[in-house]
Image (cartoon, rainbow, N blue to C red):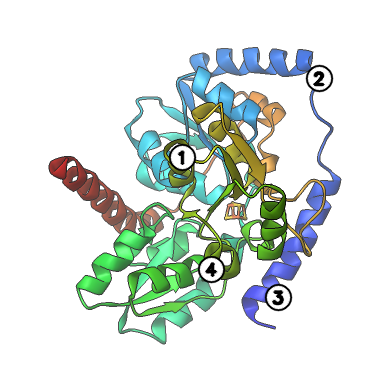
């Protein structure tokens, strides 16, 4: 069993323990009271919510209603850096809070819980990863945003799924060989699409890895008019039958632009909030999952994203102890370089797109 597979087994056990302790849903009265309290706290603390698409619909709606952001990790990083608020309340998983702190060291970064992690981050420990890099000194190190600050600090580039393919094509054009970590499915997809020489670390997302091509094909038999939208962290067999492959933001855009009225969506079901807002007349079906991680509560629903509960958002601003994100300044300085490279590269792509329009 590889390090990554062993780690994944441990992580699945942690997930089951966590799911057993997830509280029941809030009553409408309690939810409304919490939302009002959080609005007042955000004003009092000059804070803004920076939320990921995979958080609950309640958190996404509150972030939007209070001038915050709901997006993928690249846009979350940009938004937090450029927003004037003194405190960023990051609703997502730990690497997103760390990234916000690295990009904006002078701001206070809080999270509802620092226990919200990610199987990709957990499956790429810095010592093993550093040894892997040392064994392949001829390769540019490209790491996914879903990694610790220490792993980012070891990299030449940080990428999100929105920009991974562009960066790989850019490096291939320059004749460079790539060492990719940690997601094996995304790495393999980028290698197939870009033609770049890419050596892939053996990590996986426990949510996307559960999507199965057979289940999706069975659902397509019932809904033959549906198009399949898939995140590239899904297995190759799922990507092969997808009509569109892209990051969360790209999936939302595809749902609005494609002519189909019905979609089978292979990514975390938190995205349905934005999908339904972006295309209210269209129908979205969650892609079936199966396997070890599949329970009625964890199917296509990241258990760590689900830890971002309104109750926790409501008290972290008044009682931030143990939930403020700190990153060693020397480590942050080193991690900043590949992050900056990604943001500058993303900006240059936008500029060139506008320039051609
Ligand atoms: S959905 Fe997957 S990649 Fe995203 S935070 Fe959860 S475990 Fe990590």
Disc 3: which residue: 6
Image coordinates of residue 221 in percent, x first then y, are: 70, 54
Q: In which quarter of the image is residue 312?
A: top right
Please give the name of the residue rendered at 37% of the width and 40% of the height, measured from the top-left corner. 104
Label 4 to label 2, Cα distance in Å?
Answer: 39 Å
Disc 4: which residue: 185
Disc 1: which residue: 259
Q: Is mark 4 within 8 Å of ligand 1?
A: no
Q: Are marks 2 and 1 in contact (CB under 8 Å)?
A: no
Q: The C terminus lies in which quarter of the figure?
A: top left
Image coordinates of residue 157 in percent, x first then y, are: 33, 63
Image coordinates of residue 129 in percent, x first then y, are: 49, 75
- Residue 117 - label: none
Q: The N terminus lies in which quarter of the figure?
A: bottom right
268 shown above or below 202? above
Q: Do the residues labelled 4 and 2 touch (CB within 8 Å)?
A: no
Q: Nearer the viewer, residue 205 or 192?
A: 192
122 shown above or below 127? above
Element at label 2? loop
Q: Does the residue labelled 3 lie within 8 Å of ligand 1?
A: no
Residue 233 in view here: yes
Label 3 to label 1, Cα distance in Å?
Answer: 43 Å
Disc 3 or 1, which lies upstream in sequence? 3
Q: How crowded is mark 2: few (under 14 residues within 10 Å), some or many (20 or more)?
A: few
Please give the name of the residue rendered at 68% of the width and 71% of the height, measured from the top-left corner. 7
């Amino acid at each position: 069993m590889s390090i990554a597979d062993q780690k994944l087994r441990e992580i699945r056990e942690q997930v089951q323990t966590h799911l057993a302790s997830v509280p029941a849903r809030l009553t409408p009265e309690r939810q409304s009271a919490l939302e009002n309290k959080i609005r007042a706290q955000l004003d009092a603390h000059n804070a803004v919510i920076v939320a990921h698409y995979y958080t609950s619909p309640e958190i996404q709606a509150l972030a939007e209603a209070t001038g915050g952001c709901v997006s993928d990790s690249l846009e979350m990083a940009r938004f937090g850096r450029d927003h004037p608020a003194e405190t960023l309340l990051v609703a997502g998983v730990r690497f997103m809070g760390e990234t916000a702190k690295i990009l904006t060291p002078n701001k206070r970064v809080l999270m509802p819980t620092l226990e919200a992690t990610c199987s990709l981050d957990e499956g790429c420990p810095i010592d093993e990863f550093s040894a892997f890099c040392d064994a392949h000194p001829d390769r540019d190190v490209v790491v996914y945003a879903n990694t610790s600050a220490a792993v980012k600090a070891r990299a030449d580039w940080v990428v999100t799924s929105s920009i991974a393919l562009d960066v790989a094509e850019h490096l291939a054009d320059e004749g460079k060989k790539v060492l990719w970590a940690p997601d094996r499915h995304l790495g393999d997809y980028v290698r197939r699409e870009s033609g770049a020489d890419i050596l892939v670390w053996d990590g996986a997302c426990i949510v996307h890895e559960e999507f199965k091509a057979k289940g999706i094909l069975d659902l397509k038999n019932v809904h033959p008019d549906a198009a399949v939208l898939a995140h590239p962290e899904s297995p190759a067999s799922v990507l092969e039958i997808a009509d569109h492959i892209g990051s969360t933001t790209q999936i939302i855009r595809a749902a609005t632009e494609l002519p189909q009225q019905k979609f089978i969506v292979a990514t975390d079901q938190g995205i349905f909030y934005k999908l339904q807002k972006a295309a209210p007349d269209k129908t979205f079906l969650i892609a079936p999952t199966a396997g070890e991680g599949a329970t009625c509560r964890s199917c296509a629903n990241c258990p760590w994203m689900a830890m971002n509960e309104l109750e926790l958002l409501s008290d972290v601003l008044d009682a931030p102890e143990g939930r403020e994100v700190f990153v060693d300044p020397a480590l942050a300085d080193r991690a900043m370089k590949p992050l900056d490279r990604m943001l500058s590269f993303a900006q240059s792509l936008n500029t060139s797109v506008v320039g051609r329009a």
